[in-house]
């Protein structure tokens, strides 16, 4: 299990920044291995005389070891999803948002076009009420 540390912060420009860090971890493991063949290595050894002796060296590994330190830092930024039916943009969905929608709708303001079809009709009222009833994240 990795120890995770994280923060969520709203930046000055309105974006949300999520930072997740994994603290540095030391991991040392050894793995036994069998049956690995290596090529013979010719090696010349000096002797007491001026001659050399030819020797073939064969290595037989029996263990692989690793010693690793790792750390991870993940930073994600993004703009929060607006609460569309919060027409007063006060962070609260209430009857005053309904009144604001009705004022926009009665004034023929395209901000009341909740279906996005370019026409203000009863379907925009239904779409606003659906969004209002669904709430905001």
Image (cartoon, rainbow, N blue to C red):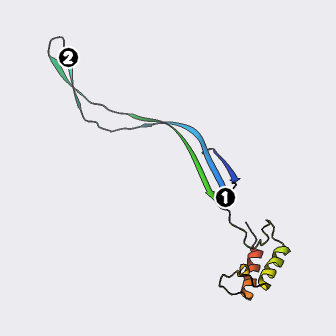
Residue 110 against residue 72 in the figure, above or below = below
Give the CA distance from mark 1 to mark 2: 73 Å
| Residue 47, position as x, y percentages in the image | 19, 14
Residue underneath mark 2 = 46
Residue drawn 17% across the image and 20% down it = 53
The dot on residue 6 is: none
Residue 2 or residue 117, whichever sits in front: 117
Q: In which image quadrant can residue 63 be found?
A: top left
Residue 39 against residue 78 in the figure, above or below = above
Residue drawn 70% across the image and 52% down it = 9
Residue 53 against residue 58 in the figure, above or below = above
| Residue 124, position as x, y percentages in the image | 72, 84
Residue 1 or residue 131, whichever sits in front: 131
| Residue 77, position as x, y percentages in the image | 62, 56
SS under mark 1: loop
Dots 1 and 2: beta carbons under 8 Å? no
Q: Is residue 93 left or right of residue 120?
A: right
Residue drawn 68% across the image and 82% down it = 115
Q: In which image quadrant can residue 108 be found?
A: bottom right
Residue underneath mark 1 = 15
Q: In which image quadrant can residue 134 be found?
A: bottom right
Dot 2 alpha-carbon crowd within 10 angstroms: few under 14, some 14 to 19, many 20 or more: few
Dot 1 alpha-carbon crowd within 10 angstroms: few under 14, some 14 to 19, many 20 or more: some
Residue drawn 58% across the image and 50% down it = 74
Q: Quadrant of the C terminus?
A: bottom right
SS under mark 2: strand
């Amino acid at each position: 299990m990795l120890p995770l540390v994280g923060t969520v912060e709203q930046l000055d420009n309105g974006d949300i920044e999520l930072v997740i860090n994994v603290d540095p971890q030391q991991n040392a493991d050894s793995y036994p291995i069998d049956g690995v063949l290596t090529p013979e290595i010719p090696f010349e050894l000096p002797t007491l005389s001026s001659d050399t002796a030819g020797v073939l060296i064969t290595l037989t590994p029996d263990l692989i070891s690793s010693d690793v330190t790792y750390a991870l830092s993940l930073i994600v930024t993004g703009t929060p999803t607006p609460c569309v039916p919060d027409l007063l943009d006060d962070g609260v969905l209430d009857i005053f948002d309904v009144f604001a929608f009705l004022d926009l709708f009665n004034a023929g303001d395209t901000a009341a076009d909740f279906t996005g079809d370019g026409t203000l009709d009863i379907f925009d009222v239904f779409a606003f009420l659906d969004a209002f009833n669904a709430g905001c994240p």
